[in-house]
Amino acid sequence: MLLSYQWLKRYIDFDIPPVDLVAKMTMSGLETVLTDEGTESNPIIEVEITPNRADCLSAKGVAREIATLFDLKLKDQAVALSERGDSISDYISVGIDNIKRCPQYSARMICGVKIAPSPAWLADLLTSAGLRPINNVVDIANFILLDEGQPLHAFDYDRVGSKKIVVRTAKEGEKFTTLDEKERILTADDLLITNGDKGLALAGIMGGLKSEVEDDTTNILLESAYFESIAIRKTSRRIGLKTDSSHRFGHGVDPQQVSRSLDRAAAMIADLAGGKICKGISEVKGEYPPLRKINIRAAKVKAILGIGIGVDGISAIMDKLRFDFKVNKDSLDVAIPSYCTDIDREIDLIEEVARLYGYNNIPNDTPRIPTVAPKVPKRIGLENNLRSLLSGVGLSEAINYSFIGDELDEVTKDTIEVRNPINKEMAFMRRSLIPSLLNNVRMNINKGNHEVSLFEIGRNYSGQEGNITEEPLLSVVLTAYIDKNLWRKQNRDFYDIKGIAESILSMAKVSDYSFEGGNGERFHPGKCAKIVASGQVIAEFGEIHPTLVKKLDLPLPVLAMEMNLNKLLAGVGAESVYKPMSKFPTAIRDIAFLLDEKVTASDVEKTIKEVGGEKLKKIVFFDEYRGKQIGEGKKSLACNLIFESEEGTLAEEEIDSLFKGIIASVEKNLGGTLR
């Protein structure tokens, strides 16, 4: 909003340098800048009015704020009204059909006016505020709106078409043409000013085209009203029409200003347009809510602002604001003026205290915040760590619905059916996360992306109605395909998904686990495994069964893993403790066994560890061989055995003893022979 010093001096006597004025107003919460339009003797400022400061949507309101900030006296504009015409009842009567949305509607008649250009002082004031002068009557209405914040509307009485004004809600679909010559389609939520039949103005927003003041107007019907702010905002937003009036009514005007602004405008019209004011006011006036009273506590001010100014300090600020109050022992009961529409609670009053005390005077102390990190539940922490790990190795997280269709998962007696599914693809609760991820793979391949790496953390659902259980799962899918333009030439296989599983176990500090052969239901019978820890199967992984791959029309093999997070959490080990590297050298021995086909590498590893003890630090399998030379149903497994001690260099005799014990144990327990 633009305001000149000349306009503000109608309310306060001041000679404050513009730089100091805009700085202090901005620091108090009203962003203000000095414009280039004014002169040295009459600067023009622009005030950015925030939605909560409807009290400053006028020159009077801004002047009141300046007077408060600089301890100046606020003047009021006297109203000298002289009623010399006939009784207003001879011309008009007012009725309101919806007193809730329009608690007050007041009207005055001014007869025998002469429409002419406004005097220079009035035209200059409007121009400084960014408005174009039109004529003396319209300019007076605009002046009162900007000066006191009360929107008014002047009708050409001879074009009203009746002797009554009725404020009512519009009929559904009713048409009305506003002053901008646009036809508006109204609803039953819109408020309309009518002559008892036809519309004259869209309440609080804009007048009608057929009753506007023109050059030949001689009789003025002047209205001043109070409209419900919510109703005006809704109508303005719905029809896309925002005016100075709707802006003020939408934020709330001062109900105590309605009648005063009407009298002042009528007196100005009689003075500047030469008319006679009819005796009396035609109005309907309901009851306004009583002035709000809010208790503000000194202790609460200190708790919120961190400053202890006490009851005396708060009282001084309330005096500056011109708020009436009563002092109690440690608080104040404050009566909120009708123009302060934004102050409803104690915290709003505390904000006023902060503004007037000065934000720059509040100590800039860093709050004392405990440095102890909040305790994260173990499972949530595990899931966060899994996301970091899997994202770090190049996988993308997928989030799918918990529902699934029979195309992706075989429907059995254990399947939980959704009572009211969105569609057939969401008719059942999923028992596994893998089918949803396979569907993601299919969609990627259909769009030309053949290298897919996804993981999902979610829940599965099992049981019967009334006894449904759910468990958190982690699932991973990888397509075997690798872009041959990259340095890696070979496709991904079983060992890639196994490597991811081992990385998860390492991250979770699970040490007591083993790999065993899978059951081959969901996975390829010869290319799958399961992870067993503490006697429980915590995960299965491998290549997806060819039948399922064919059913989903996938053109290439897909690798997958599914892990039960509750069981993984049960096997999580203690936090890592730093342990220095041994100062003594390691000893490496290679060994190869001839074994039956049914003996797994896991069986061999477990047997070797039982004999090797603490001095056997690592087992690395590096070769598996099958062929005619070793016979049918046989295989050869070769591995490195790495020995080390923290106490000293291992003697050859000690290593030989361990080595012989390992060979003997494999031969005895697994039927293997040394090659």
Image: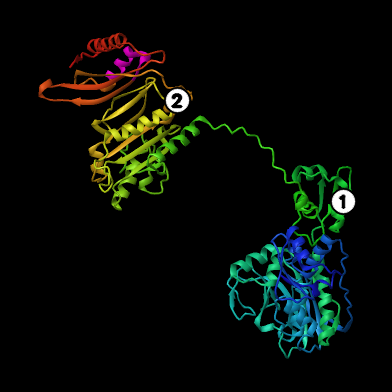
What residue is shown with label 1? Answer: 315
Q: Residues within 10 Å of mark 2 (few under 14, many from 20)?
A: some
Question: Is 387 colored magenta in this rendering?
Answer: no
Q: What is the residue that sits farthest to the bottom in this orientation?
A: 216
User: Could you tell me residue 467's position as x and y percent?
Assistant: 44, 30
* Residue 203 visible within the image: no
Residues tagged 2 and 1 counted as in contact (Cβ below 8 A): no
- In the rendered view, tell whether residue 649 sits above or below residue 489: above
User: Could you tell me residue 316's position as x and y percent?
Assistant: 87, 53
* Residue 499 visible within the image: yes
Res 464 quadrant in image: top left
Give the magenta-colored segment's residue range. 603-617
What residue is shown with label 2? Answer: 572
User: Could you tell me residue 63's position as x and y percent?
Assistant: 81, 67
Tell me which amino acid carries mark 2: Val
- Give the mark, 2 or 1, whose residue is nearer the N terminus: 1
Q: Is residue 310 left or right of residue 542?
A: right
User: Could you tell me residue 626's position as x and y percent?
Assistant: 15, 25
Tell me which amino acid carries mark 1: Ser
Say what secondary structure mark 2 lies in: loop
Give 328 or 471, whichever is nearer the viewer.
328
Say what secondary structure mark 1 lies in: helix
Q: Quadrant of the C terminus?
A: top left
Give 238 or 163, whichever is nearer the viewer.
238
